[in-house]
Image (cartoon, grey):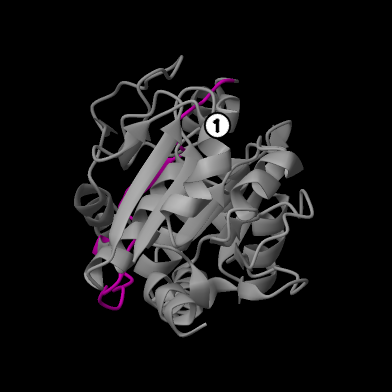
Amino acid sequence: MKVAFLTEGGTSYGGGHLVRCHALSEAFVERGIECTIYVQGDSTLVADVERKDWREDTQFLSTIGAAYDIVVMDSYHATAAMYALVKMQGTRLVVFDDLHRLDYGADYIINASPAARYDEKGFYGPSYATLRKEFWDVPQKEISEMQRILVTIGNIDPDGRLKEIMSQLPAVKTDVVVGPDFPFVPKGEHISVHTKLSAGEMRKLMADADICVSACGQTLYELARCGVPTIGVGLFDNQKDLVKGFLEAGFITFAGWYTDFTVADAVREMTPAKRRKASQIGQHLVDGQGCRRIVDGLLQG
């Protein structure tokens, strides 16, 4: 069996799509199944990928389905015609869909949001969260005094929101994860800046953090898995479903959207009791076995 992934990543796309595709590929590889990831964009987050402008290559899209038993697509930009080209070759088509963007004609949909709508055959809800293998098995979080903050808002910051977030934080030890092209990088004796982190390095930062200030993208799943009490800031409109789902589940404290957020108030709300409850909710919600469950379902289906 062979599996192909078609996705995007880089300066114009962020890193979430590529990271979750790579995570799912790790579960296939664990079963001895060959995977190839085709990435449109300039992302350097994952090394073993094929860089290809696949959306512009009709010939490639019209033949890939005959070369692979399963094709997984994760894109906010592919058109319905592109999905149809892949599907017409007889492959099983699996689609990551956060936005209910199109009628994909897919065999399976993956939407791990706690607010996912079960519209079509597929894998829905946080039990199918596609985490990197370093997050599959994580110990229970120990909640202590709030002495260390983690700030991570993704691989891109086109509107410079990090500067405003940092201005609202107390002067305690703070780890800040930045992308390669951030317009603002904070400095200070209490601040440590990190970039180009491996999954293992990111997991350690989460393990060390007492709270996290995070954008409301795919990182929320890893934070939940690690039990890190999290203050969410909605930085992009496509994060609305995740905000809704994680807020209703009780995992995040929501500081607001990119046009109007107040992180300082949210930090003050993070009492030990509230952090302990959020940590327990997160680790119960996301158990780290989503990739394996999806692969099991596809192999049995």
Question: Left of 23 or right of it: where is 108?
Answer: right
**Residue at 54% over, 60% down:** 91
Quarter of the figure with residue 78: top right
Magenta segment, which residues? 134-158
In the figure, 151 relative to 211: above or below? above
| Residue at the extreme bottom of the image, as rendered | 300
User: Where is residue 164 drawn, in percent x and y?
Assistant: 55, 26
Residue 256 visible, this angle: no
Q: Main secondary structure of the magenta part?
A: loop
- Closer-to-camera residue (196/214): 196
Residue topped by disc 1: 59
Q: Which SS class for mark 1? A: helix
Q: Amino acid at mark 1?
A: Gln
| Tally of numbered tags | 1
Whether 193 is among the magenta residues is: no
- Closer-to-camera residue (247/238): 238
Whether 145 is among the magenta residues is: yes
| Residue at the extreme top of the image, as rendered | 183
Question: Left of 241 or right of it: where is 148?
Answer: left
User: Where is residue 25 drawn, in percent x and y?
Assistant: 34, 58
